[in-house]
Image (cartoon, helix red, strand yellow):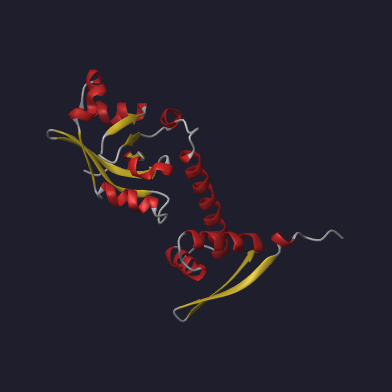
Amino acid sequence: MKLKPTWLEPRQRILQRHGKRLSIQLEHEFWDQLEVCAKDQGIKLSELIFELVAANPDTNRSSLLRTYCARWMRNKLLRAHLASSNADIQALLTACPMPCVVITREKKLVAQNGAFSDKILGSLVAPDQWEDADNIIRFSLGKPIDRIIRDLTDGSAQYVETNVAFTRGSAIVQMIGRFCLLHQRTSKASPLLCYLDLQRARG
């Protein structure tokens, strides 16, 4: 009879935190990955798991942790790709179906995709002014740009979500933006990639 690989073998663990106990069964491979996830965030494994369970009380715990591992790895791979010198930023923008921009630490728009031009610039300026949009439109954030960059560079967040507003005179477009960092090797000068969610627009 063929033996099952060790990494497929389930393992029951009991975790304790602040007098509370959790009993969870996962394959060895997932326990190992969760240890890496916790270390990456500078916290203990028990702290990570208790926080995930508390935030998702109605979800099967084993499924929750397996999915968390998969999402963590996917985000890690994406960030590694964006940090590489071979990342084609324009290709990323073009492929994105939702409004997407690249901004600098000084909050300057340096690149944008077609969805951003059509759905946001189109409501604020005429098409022949799109090239000069950064000088015409005022761009504001719900969080200071330095705080967004700090949260991204210290590894505490895969992305930072905050309110975003584009205004011209009395006209305004408000929405939610998700920011991630590009070219992390030179974080002081790194631009930010922002995906804008029109479905959650406010105002």
**Horizontal and vertical percent for residue 186?**
39, 42
Q: Is residue 181 above or below residue 16?
A: above
Residue most toward the top?
128
Closest to the observer, 73 or 66: 73
Q: Quadrant of the C terminus?
A: top left
Q: Quadrant of residue 67?
A: bottom right
Residue most toward the bottom?
19
Q: Is residue 171 above or below residue 69?
A: above
Q: Quadrant of the N terminus?
A: bottom right
Residue depicted at 25% across the width and 39% down the height: 106
Tell me how many marks there are. Answer: 0
Residue depicted at 26% across the width and 22% down the height: 131
Residue most toward the left?
170
Q: Viewed as shown, does residue 108 lie left or right of 13? A: left
**Horizontal and vertical percent for residue 161?**
34, 49
Q: Viewed as shown, does residue 3 lie left or right of 110? A: right
**Horizontal and vertical percent for residue 201?**
28, 42
Q: Is residue 97 above or below residue 130?
A: below
Q: Is residue 112 above or below residue 34?
A: above
**Horizontal and vertical percent for residue 133?**
23, 27
Residue depicted at 41% across the width and 40% down the height: 182
Residue most toward the right?
1
Residue depicted at 38% across the width and 50% down the height: 152
